[in-house]
Amino acid sequence: MKRRDFLKFSPTLSLPFLLNGLPLTAKAGNPLLYLLREQTINNGRVLVLIQMNGGNDGLNTLPPLDQYSNLSKARNNILLPASRVLSLNGVPQTGLHPSMTGIQNMYNSGQVNIVQAAGYANPSFSHFRATDILLTGSASDSYLSTGWLGRTLESEYPGYPGGYPNTDMPDPLSIQIGSQASLVTQCTTANAAVTVTNPSTFYELINGVSGSVPDSPYGHELTFVRLIKQQTSEYTSVIKNAFNASSGNTVTYPSNNTLADQLQIVARLIKGGLKTPVYVVNHPDSFDTHANQVDTMDVTRGNHANMLAVLSDAVAAFQQDLINMQISDRVASMTLTEFGRRIKSNDSVGSDHGAATPMFFFGTNLNPVIIGNNPSIPDTVTVSDQVNMQHDIKAIYYTVLKDWFQLSDTDIASVFPDAYTVLPIFKQVALPVTLLSFTGNWIGKTVNLQWQTEHELGIDRYEVQRSDDGISFVTIGTVNAVNSSVKHTYSFADTSLSKSLYYYRIKIAEQSSAVEFSSVLLLKTNQSSGGSRVKVFPNPVTDRFTVSSEKKMSGSVTVTLADINGREVWKQEKESTDSFDLSFSLAGKKPVPGIYFMRLYNKNEETTARVMIQ
């Protein structure tokens, strides 16, 4: 059956009602639900939006360690000590706020994707206008009354909610935990979300307990109305059945954490079989940190630290719960905040409304990388200087619809008329052939790529594309397609390498001239795998330090320091020994504070280490 064939096109209104004491609003439905049943019926995908209202300070959330020299002059009263920033595997120039240990562990285990400097052209610094732009996906000079997900739903299912729920779509179509449905799911005439006021009233629904009522004629009437609404509600039974079918959460969520309370409900509903594809939850606090952003006695503590800890602890518990429930492969979460903060802090130990800020994605079907570069901080920062946008939020939303929900170009065109370059956020994309695997590995100075396909039909060639940043790709080779209906393995060797990290993807060119792309593969070489391990202490380094090698390197050894851009900034030669005592004062000018790569090498071997200079 076509997804529009069974729709009844009748005018509808949004009507508030009560489910056993639980305030809900029945609003326009979610076409993604049926779409996912067509495309991923056995593992219908779910998107969880985490709204962080107020405008989050990205510079203290995701500190750019290679910019600390200039940052220390711009926001010395709120800047985190570099030594306290949490490290991330493979990205020594970038870290996380010290309170985000849960997300740090998730990133290091491959469950986080971060998009640097998300924003839009000509940003607004008004909370109300910026929030409208964020949730509608409009340009700064245009006004939309519908959300980007709302337009998606309306495009796929015009006329909803007439005739719903039914046997094909018996479940709630979108759920918002909060007193008011988000603009992000707003359609033309109604909102596409069912709203649950808060976790406490949700459990009243599940347990069949209504909120207390007065012992009066009014109270008696209210009790009767609640009973009738409970019996006649379209969604009460499916919500309760899904929640109870999940057999409970598998982890202990953090206490006194309202965001965690919301997410543990979401986890149980997904596990219980509810096919709702979009959930919206709200961080309980405001990120509008104009004053007292940090504790003046310890800048790693304070209001901002507490809010980030709530986010990190809640998301970490939620993600582990999904993994234990064996449903993590079909759930992705993303953060939304209306803007970032200014580079320069204010005199109230806070930060004011700014422009771009990082956006976080959580899940097991993500490319675990940071997309984009650290913000560039000028040597002299004025009060008007901003973190410049690198990635338009519309391109991020476009990627969610294209790669996560696997909508067609025609479907997306009704939401975003202009096409955008898909960002390498998700591992999986829709392909014209069955791509069984896409893998690669380093052998010496060569990257060997392999991909296995089946059910090829009408494919002309596969173009191997490479990128330094995961955004701009160039074709480095072509492999002709065999158009086999059975499994076939292709291979390609990339020998023109000069860096230690590359992104790869396969461009699939059809004979009809249509093209599609594989997921993006990130490959990093371990430069120290062929040499000896090295330790630097103390690290962070001030002036004098010792470099200790696991095994003695023969002959003359050269020690160099390179900045994050690969520029050599310091060099010294030493005779072979197990350890080297080094001093900047004895061997040239000390580099400015920041993260550096130390290289020890002779004519036969080399090894590297990361060094932080204070």
Image: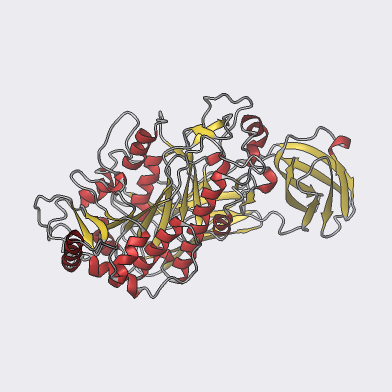
Residue at x 17%, y 50% (from the top left corner): 14
**Residue 6 position within the rendered picture, expressed as x and y whole percent measured from the top left:** 12, 61
In this view, the residue in front, 479 or 393, is 393
Q: How many marks?
A: 0
Against 144, is 319 above or below?
Answer: below
Left or right: 336 with respect to 89?
left
Residue 481, located in which quarter of the rendered image? bottom left
**Residue 140 position within the rendered picture, expressed as x and y whole percent measured from the top left:** 35, 31
Left or right: 86 with respect to 548?
left
Residue at x 26%, y 64% (from the top left corner): 37
Residue at x 14%, y 50% (from the top left corner): 13
Residue 462, located in which quarter of the rendered image? bottom left
Residue at x 72%, y 40% (from the top left corner): 562
Against 248, is 312 above or below?
Answer: above
Rendered image coloring scheme? secondary structure
Against 170, is 63 above or below?
Answer: above
